[in-house]
Amino acid sequence: MKNILVTGGAGFIGSAFVRRAVQKYPNYRIVVLDKLTYAGNMDNLLPVQNAPNYRFERGDITHRETVERVLQAHQIDAIVNFAAESHVDRSILDPDAFINTDVVGVYTLLDTARQLGIQRLHHVSTDEVYGSIEQGFFREGDPLLPNSPYAASKAGGEMMLRAYQVTYGMHTTVTRGSNTFGPYQYPEKVVPFFITEALEDHPLPMYGDGMQVRDWLYVDDHCDAIDTVLHQGAPGTIYNIGGEHEMHNIDMTRFMLKTLGKPESLIHYVADRPGHDLRYALTNDKIRAELGWTPQHSFERAMEATVRWYQQNEWWWRKIKTGEYLDYYKRQYAARLAEA
Ligand code: NAD
Ligand code: TYD
């Protein structure tokens, strides 16, 4: 592998992967292909913008001609696909873009790669494809029972990967990561949303009773696991990536507020998300046994570092919280908060 195409590399996890890969692999060329949707942000790539082994291409993974041109122009050997519509609440409001990018986009990448003889594609998926689990932990062989349009579209993308591996013998791998947090995360997901709202003393809209459980994975651990699977994963294999740190939403929020030095009175219980998954939980048994990977960051340290980053980088999130963001905020929260 020499030339790697990172789709969705201007988003949260994709940009963390790019910042790391550009440093770690000076002999690789890291090419980003990103549509720059509301979630894509060139500020996330500022630290690598002058690196000699980095290139940026703006484009849509659902456009075959674009994908073909980029794959050929940079003589790509392997694709790592982060590009997605990624927010559950937005998928409930407007599912269309999710089907396009998360299903048709994955198909377009696969089929264009196959036609050009590019064998290697790693796909970044999510634990949400399994649905919700009240007790125990999801394993890679469990059935997929996605509950939100987002989760269903990610499961659809995975099915295309499976078909291309079985039918055409492509070397595909899939990782199913759990809830990821860290610097540069678009402030719609709960962690950066609550931190930045709390910094402004705004109310934090907690869905339902706040007793839902998520497994928290630090972004550097997530990227390290993807890198490990990209280099060592067996063809056609799926790996869970869990943070091994489950928390109720209310406890996670209390810890964050304590770290920020803000009062719990900012928490407002609001109408629940429709179809809200109660609990996500994964076992890392497979990736640990087969590839020797485990998460390296403690939740507490990583959350403290994350809180500090948003405190120290207002320039980054204040420009986002304008325009389209405020329209979305109104649609998602105005009625909920007014009723609370
Ligand atoms: P994000 O929303 O921050 O970034 C998505 C990126 O994809 C953006 O830069 C956007 O511009 C780009 N993009 C969207 N549609 C595109 C298209 N049609 N063509 C090209 N680029 C397009 O997402 P994220 O949180 O960084 O997630 C990255 C991946 O990881 C996604 O596939 C997501 O499903 C998966 N994942 C996320 C989490 C999480 O907690 N954030 C957990 C597990 C898995
Ligand atoms: P989120 O960050 O959207 O990730 P996901 O839905 O993919 O797990 O939400 C994490 C948890 O936080 C989820 O149980 C929903 C809850 N949540 C709230 O209570 N209020 C909010 O405003 C948001 C965005 C999420």
Image (cartoon, grey):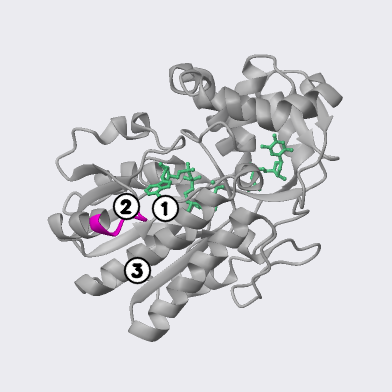
Residue type at tag 2: Val
Q: Which residue is mark 2?
A: 6
Q: Which residue is mark 1?
A: 82
Mark 3 or mark 1, earlier in chain: 1
> Quick check: 28 above or below 326?
below
Q: CA–CA distance between discs 3 and 1?
A: 14 Å
Residue type at tag 1: Phe
The circle on residue 110 is 3
Residue 193 placed where, x, y %? 61, 30
Q: Main secondary structure of the magenta part?
A: loop
Disc 2 element: strand
Q: CA–CA distance between discs 1 and 2?
A: 7 Å
Residue type at tag 3: Leu
Q: Determine if the magenta segment contains residue 339.
A: no
Q: Contact, CB < 8 Å: mark 2 with mark 3?
A: no
**At x 28% / y 67%, what residue is drawn?**
112
156 horizontally vs 32: left or right: right
Mark 2 or mark 3, earlier in chain: 2
